[in-house]
Image (cartoon, helix red, strand yellow):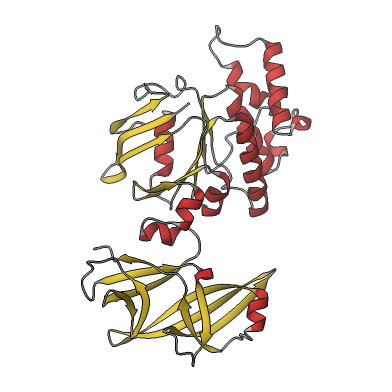
Amino acid sequence: MSIEVKNVSKNFGAVRVLDNVNLRIDAGELVALLGPSGCGKTTLLRIIAGLETADTGSIYLEDDDATLTGARERQVGFVFQHYALFRHMSVFENVAFGLRVKPKNERPSEEQIRHKVHELLDMVQLKFLKDRFPAQLSGGQRQRIALARALAIEPRVLLLDEPFGALDAKVRKELRKWLRKLHDELHVTSVFVTHDQEEALEVSDTVVLMNHGRLEQIGTPEEVYNRPATPFAYGFLGNVNRFHGVVSNGKFRIADVTFDHAIHAGAPENTPVVAFARPADLDIVSASNTQPGIPAVIDRILSFGPSSKIELTSSLVQDDSARHVEYEVQWPRDRVTQAALREGMHVKLVPTGLRVFEQPAH
């Protein structure tokens, strides 16, 4: 089932949480609402679910206006961060709950309920726990039971609010893969909220990046990571090095170093700009190299597995004052060995790829 959010705004008191949001989610998609805390992603999810009401705007489910429809009528499955399982009920009874509370004319027979619950517990690979209570389960098991319970009512849409946020890193990683595999089997239109960029990029078909109640960028994981549309998108997605400089003869200049990276035509001389480079898009050369580069000192070299992380500090004189800026470079481990890099070495940083934006006005 497709979802369409049209011109949705929401205020909590004087705070505008959602600002004229427009979004279409196609049937069968798995979409991540990604952004920092307070950007409005959970509020948007709750408005889609019918658990919250927008101040203005509409929600369409499969082209039907559901704005004034209650949560139950929308046939939405909702999974919360903290499981929300009934502690006094067994795993079996928790999963059966949504079926048992259906109106009498829609309620399945006990035999149908039993068959459905066993089928769902098989699907989440936890049938052997059917007689246990939530307190006897691990966090990962509880979250899978919560998902089975949400799926029991055969929702047209599945909504998940930070579903793995309360779990440790290893379990979270396992459940990401499991959720992606489950979605590929069921093809239920699904939307999940996360502030974890890695989670959004690994699991979703489409990433919706939010910032201050607005949609900052929408695209596939590959698009939003490799082609960020705004400074915020660049800074939020993945590790990034940030360079503050100005326009100089159509090129990017930082302190007294001018790089051969053209800036779009029309930017006036000395316009403040900010440039971004991923850790893998920075080269390290000797301090005596004649290439334009930012002088820096290697602080630490961390080598885990095939790659190394090199942490550096640069002291640049800008506007007659020294600025200490930290940078990060990622190289293959054997390249670090071949270059004989060591802590305390004076070097130059040379960007191999820079993305330059005009500084937003404040």
Q: Is residue 128 left or right of residue 72?
A: right
Tell me where residue 303 sits by quadrant.
bottom right
Q: Is residue 62 above or below residue 87?
A: above
Please state if 213 lies on the left or on the right of 14 as rendered: right
Q: Is residue 34 left or right of residue 11?
A: right
Residue 252 x %, y %: 33, 75
Q: Nearer the viewer, residue 315 or 253?
A: 253
Q: Is residue 51 visible?
A: no
The image quarter in which residue 180 lies? top right
Residue 296 position within the rendered picture, expressed as x and y whole percent measured from the top left: 47, 85
Q: Position of residue 83 (x, y in %)?
A: 59, 37
Image coordinates of residue 297 in percent, x first then y, are: 51, 86
Residue 126 image-quadrant placement: top right
Nearest the viewer among 220 and 143 is 220
In front of the other: 334 or 207: 334
101, above or below 241, in the image? above
Q: Residue at x 31, y 86 (%)?
A: 321
- The one of 4 and 72 positioned closer to us in this rendering: 4
Q: Residue at x 27, y 84 (%)?
A: 319
